[in-house]
Amino acid sequence: MKQVAAICALFLLAGVVFAGGIENKSNMSPGYLRNPSRNTETKRPEASFYNIAGTAFMEDGLYIEAGNQFVAKEYINTLEKDADLSNVGLSGTTYKDNTFVWLYPNVDVVYKHDDWSVFGNFGVYAGGGSLSYPDGTSATTLLFAKAGLAQMMAGQTDAADALFAAGKDHDFSVSSITYGGQLGGAYAIMDMVSIGAALRFTYGTQEMSIKSSHLTGLGNGGNEISYAADAFAFSGVFGVHVKPLQRLDVSMQFQMASNLEYELKDVEGDLASDFGIKDGNKFRTDISPVLNFGVGYQVIDALYVSASLNWYLNRFAEMNSILGETDYDDSFEIAVGADYDFNKFVTASLGVAYGNQGVSNDSNNVFNPVLDSFQVGAGVEVRPIENLSLTGGMTYVKYFPEDYAVSNEGKSYGIELEKNLFMFAIGATYRLPF
């Protein structure tokens, strides 16, 4: 029953993506939700991720920042109507995930003194939550249906009926989180130029499961097919920040790839082993290398405007599964924004961003659609007392639907992918002025 076991293999394609590239995240602080143009940051400790060289231009002191993001999301995939599938009641169905993400934390620490700085941060560098499809997905339903049609053609009516029943009645869930942190330092060579470098560590975890009472009758040894996997990697980050004019900032940063080789463990379900999914098997799902560029200008004392470009070099990363290689073009995110100081107590921010993911209609993710997007962010930063900043931000992301084509034995099946996302965040920063 290897056709059914292919369903298990699809688990390895799933992740949870909010903002950034295919795997990379750019929503690494509440400040990003206020204004997604962050690449020339030199005032706040979130520069320890977005602009490491810029930490050398911060005011002297020890900065500690902590924040959390809350994510309301709706992932939608619709199996388009097909005559073969309609005959067995598996066609034209819409599947949704509405899991709310309550915990998406970040911590940033910077110590700046004279011309140098040291810094560290921690956050969710990829993944970032859970997906739950209580009625299954288009992909899993389609695989059950195709396996059932094959059994029906072979005259195995009992197996075919069980497969069709499982296609109508199964539960799919996945959790994917890649934690990351980096430690580094920066040095201002002169008043105009600073350089920075950091060592990054990433640790990825995945847990996925498909459940159906009909799996037991198919020889699975139980009602669940599931697995867990983890991986870790070290990489580097290098940056430079230039101030050719007193009010002008220009930054460039390079994030090396994090080569994450996952190893399967705790595999459940006899059908999984039929497809070669066993404890100890490995696959690579890298976090791509990234080029970050930024330009910012202090128009007046109260108004700072900036533009940022993040270029994700997907062609230099392996984002594969146990099924084989995937093929993504490079992706990019471009953002512009502004921060305005009403007075010494309140700053308001506004920004927009556009993301192009470099996907095609035959290279995507049914469970977690990878879609081009446009986002708008806004928020405020309040300083109630000296050296303490409180921030709140929100962003809405408009994703553009795509059709995804799945081919099997010369026949193409269509799946429409959609996604809606709203995020809000809170955070606090305290500076010890020494």
Image (cartoon, grey):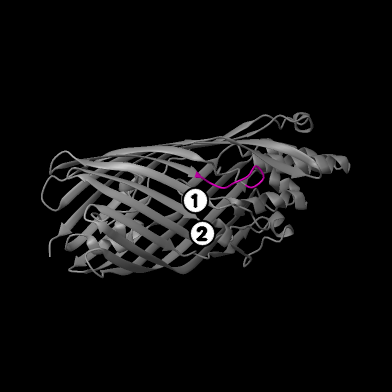
Is the Cβ of the residue at disc 2 closer than 8 Å to that at disc 1?
yes
- Evaluate whether residue 317 shows in this view: no
Which segment did they paint magenta? 356-363
Asked if residue 350 can be seen in this view, the reply is yes
Query: Where residue 241 appears, x then y in whole percent?
Result: 31, 61
281 above or below 215?
below
Kindly identify the residue that appears in the image at 66 percent across and 58 percent down. Answer: 325
Which mark is first along the chain, 1 or 2?
A: 1
- Work out whether residue 285 or residue 341 is closer to the camera in this orientation and state it: 341
Above or below, 146 relative to 201: above
Residue at x-position 33% and y-position 51%:
295
Kind of residue at disc 2: Ser
Is 51 on the left-hand or right-hand side of 22?
left
Q: Which residue is mark 1?
A: 21
| Residue 376, percent from left and from top | 38, 37
Q: Residue at image x 14%, y 43%? A: 345
Q: Which residue is mark 2?
A: 288
Magenta-colored stretch includes residue 357: yes
